[in-house]
Amino acid sequence: MTTSTTGVPGIRERNRAAIEAEILTVGRRHLAEVGAAALSLRAVARDLGMVPSALYRYVAGRDDLLTLLIVAAYDDLADAVDAALARQQTEQPASGPRAAFTAIATATRRWALTHPHEHALIFGSPVPGYTAPAERTTGPGTRVDAHLIALFSGLDAPPLPGVDPATQELGAASLADTLQDPMFLGANLSPTELLRGVTAWTLVLGAVSSELFEHHGPDLATDRDAHFAAVVDLAAALAFPPDSPDSQS
Amino acid sequence: MTTSTTGVPGIRERNRAAIEAEILTVGRRHLAEVGAAALSLRAVARDLGMVPSALYRYVAGRDDLLTLLIVAAYDDLADAVDAALARQQTEQPASGPRAAFTAIATATRRWALTHPHEHALIFGSPVPGYTAPAERTTGPGTRVDAHLIALFSGLDAPPLPGVDPATQELGAASLADTLQDPMFLGANLSPTELLRGVTAWTLVLGAVSSELFEHHGPDLATDRDAHFAAVVDLAAALAFPPDSPDSQS
DNA sequence: TGTACATCAGTGAACGCGCGTTCACTGATGTAC
DNA sequence: TGTACATCAGTGAACGCGCGTTCACTGATGTAC
């Protein structure tokens, strides 16, 4: 369309890309400052030195901007997790899935602490009057999950002591349908592994949100890092077999 | 002041109490319908058949109304938990702390599912531009916690298999200061018990929020009750010794 | 290389909306003597 | 029991604010011939 016949993008196209990037940057800054509920198209436009209506050349409306920010947040988090995994892979090439789980959990918490509003946007209470379009958010929203699924596969952990086998069985069975999702293709995950993995991850996210939103006040732990490490250790004990190596730094 | 010399409240005083109650009722209904972020003084006044400014006779402003609603939500949840515990006490008088933990978790989830916005108000992301006055919310906010503390005391559970003792020790130590809080007076709780108890409860709240906010989409489990029961079973395994009885209904 | 036309970016004004909060006021309810 | 005064509940109008979205428009950038 606007592409010239040589395939080289013209100025218009380059400008458009530049401004789209700028909108995203400013949008993220506003999100970080005021939160999703108070995010305003007019304020973003103001900050871009534009008149509000001009934004509609680039964004269909406020909801569309929110969707862009959600996608960006998921991607940013996933990038941070990818980086943490890669770092670990080079520093401790022999480490197993449990250490990878710990690395993912730690990176997720770090990211949340540095991006509280973006964490709230994707893991907190829903933004009033907005529902995310699944076809745009599920892709980036499952990048971290894909890592976890790989880690939880083929563990064959023995039942935890003090756990009721019948209750576990029923809970696992209720997840069987989910395993049909294409996401799990080739993962070779058992319902029980999924149950225990999802539970471990729920605990991690719960701990992060609990720390961030201060459910137990600001002073629960004197050493928050140590507290979180212990929680992650417990979470890992839910999903991984007892002899699984976990190298804490 | 307005009390007559006989000690019997006059009409004014009774009217005032009645209207205060009505404000709370309408406020809660609005909260349930639109959520905390969209809660508006004007709308509440409208619904009461009053002019907006009249509300200021009863409430200092929007923030004050929010505080009232937070207190009411905590109390309502705690009432539901109390009722569930009492019911269990009569139906299964011989059941132990682990069964009580399960009852509390189940009641908390039930309450959250029937009061999603109130759950979000106290356990979700913070309301933008509002910070709760601790001196008014901590009282009702810790009623459920008090039950849990009692349950977690004196358990002396053995270390979970697959858990790193050093990591647990550090995590527990970071909670030692918290144990000085008057709330723990006479509870005889060890740092390790607190760590494992808080973690178990974090998992429960995380699971409730995850289900409510649909972090894994609407269709993670075909039988959500069974899924939740299995998660609570795993949570209990974190805090209670393996031989602790847990009677699932 | 030059001209006629189509596309696009951004402007500026306006729409209608709802919000929290203030203020001077009326009329009813209570209190003191 | 009656009267003068103080307290309180609720009214109505107004303040200034920011919001999302629409619309007709100007001027610049690109395209076709």
Image (cartoon, coloured by chain):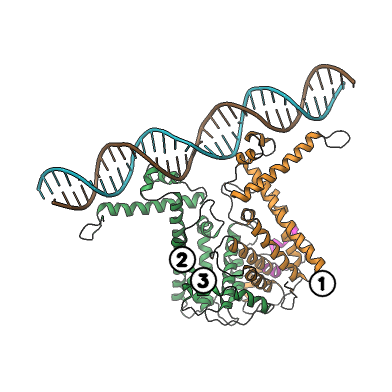
Chain colours: A green, B orange, C cyan, D brown
Q: List x then y, in percent, for residue A54.
A: 36, 44
Numbered disc 1: secondary structure: loop
Numbered disc 3: secondary structure: helix
Which label was assigned to residue A78? Answer: 2
Task: Find out whether residue B194 is within the magenta segment.
Answer: yes
Q: In the shown orientation, is residue A79 left or right of residue B148? A: left
Q: Does label 3 lie on the same chain as label 2?
A: yes
Q: List x then y, in percent, for residue B138.
A: 70, 53
- Disc 1, disc 2: CB below 8 Å? no
Displayed quadrant of residue D22: top left
- Name the one closer to the observer, D19 or B44: B44
Which label was assigned to residue B94? Answer: 1
Q: Which numbered disc, 1 or 2, marks the residue closer to the eye? A: 1
Kind of residue at disc 3: Ala
Displayed quadrant of residue A89: bottom left
Q: Which residue is mark 3?
A: A103
